[in-house]
Image (cartoon, rainbow, N blue to C red):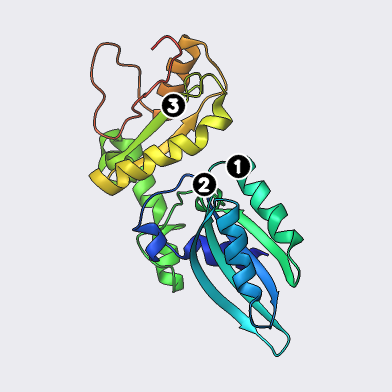
Amino acid sequence: MWNFLKRNRDSRSSAQDVGPYSNYRMAIRLELTQRTGVFAQVANAMAEENASLGAMDIVSATRTKIIRDITVDVQSEEHGEQVLKRLNTLPDVRVIASSDRIFLMHLGGKIRVESKFPIKTRNTLSMVYTPGVGRVVKAIASDEKQAYTFTSKSNSIAVVTDGSAILGLGNLGPLAALPVMEGKAMLFQQFAGIDAWPLCLNTQDSEKTRSQTVATSGEPARIGRSHPAGSAACQRQSSRR
């Protein structure tokens, strides 16, 4: 099952990613009897259910069975369930697994941290971590401005939300806001080269939001003044907005 999910998640260079967009695109793995006309049943069923059949790949085949991955555009989640039920009624056809490509794109989150230097030797490890990093720690302790030179702080911001106004969906809380904040972080990196970090706060108190954002930035509060590059940028999604 995981291989099926990962395979479909990572197939981002396929035609379905450059063709017309569908908000409800399903990836379905089928086991079919190895016999002429079985896949034609699948295609006819999709047409009768008003579902658009897209990419088709053969995963494996034996003398008696064939495993296929197909993509299908449906009209809604309910329509997708209807399509799966229809497939399960077909003779010589078994649904092994199905997934929603949008959920696949979010599987495990959309962002991650990657190091700039591969740690392949003990010397590298000793320089990026202890004991070498201790020298950098002391340099920053003696002059805090050095943090903008010797850490990622100079190119980092926080994308802050309290989850009170998630897109057009309303006040759904900080955890529900995280996929949106990850998306915003992707846009900052893709189009501006800025490292953005989602910060979803479990409070909708304006003062707590402000104080927690400032505390996270590691900077003293500067009311009415712009923060230096790299301090947390509060993009508060307020229901009053």
Residue 17 in the image, given as x and y percentages of width and height: 39, 58
Mark toward the start of the polypeptide (2 vs 3): 2
Q: Are marks 2 and 1 in contact (CB under 8 Å)?
A: yes
Residue 59 in the image, given as x and y percentages of width and height: 59, 77
Quadrant placement of the C terminus: top left
Residue 100 in the image, given as x and y percentages of width and height: 57, 51
Q: Residue beneath label 1, please?
A: 77
Q: Is residue 139 visible?
A: no
The dot on residue 30 is none
Residue positioned 44% across, 35% down in the render? 181
Mark toward the start of the polypeptide (2 vs 1): 2
Residue positioned 30% across, 16% down in the render? 222
Name the foreground residue: 147 vs 190: 190
Q: Is residue 110 visible?
A: yes
Residue positioned 38% across, 40% down in the render? 185
Q: Estimate how packed mark 2 is, as few (under 14), some (14 to 19) or many (20 or more) residues with alpha carbons within 10 Å.
A: some
Q: Could you tell me which secondary element the residue under label 2 belongs to? A: loop
The amino acid type, in three-letter code, at marker 1 is: Glu
Name the foreground residue: 50 vs 239: 50
Residue 198 in the image, given as x and y percentages of width and height: 45, 35
The dot on residue 167 is 3
The amino acid type, in three-letter code, at marker 3 is: Leu
Of badges 1 and 3, nearer the viewer stands 1
Label 2 to label 1, Cα distance in Å?
A: 7 Å
Quadrant placement of the N terminus: bottom right
Q: Residue beneath label 2, please?
A: 24
Of badges 2 and 3, nearer the viewer stands 2
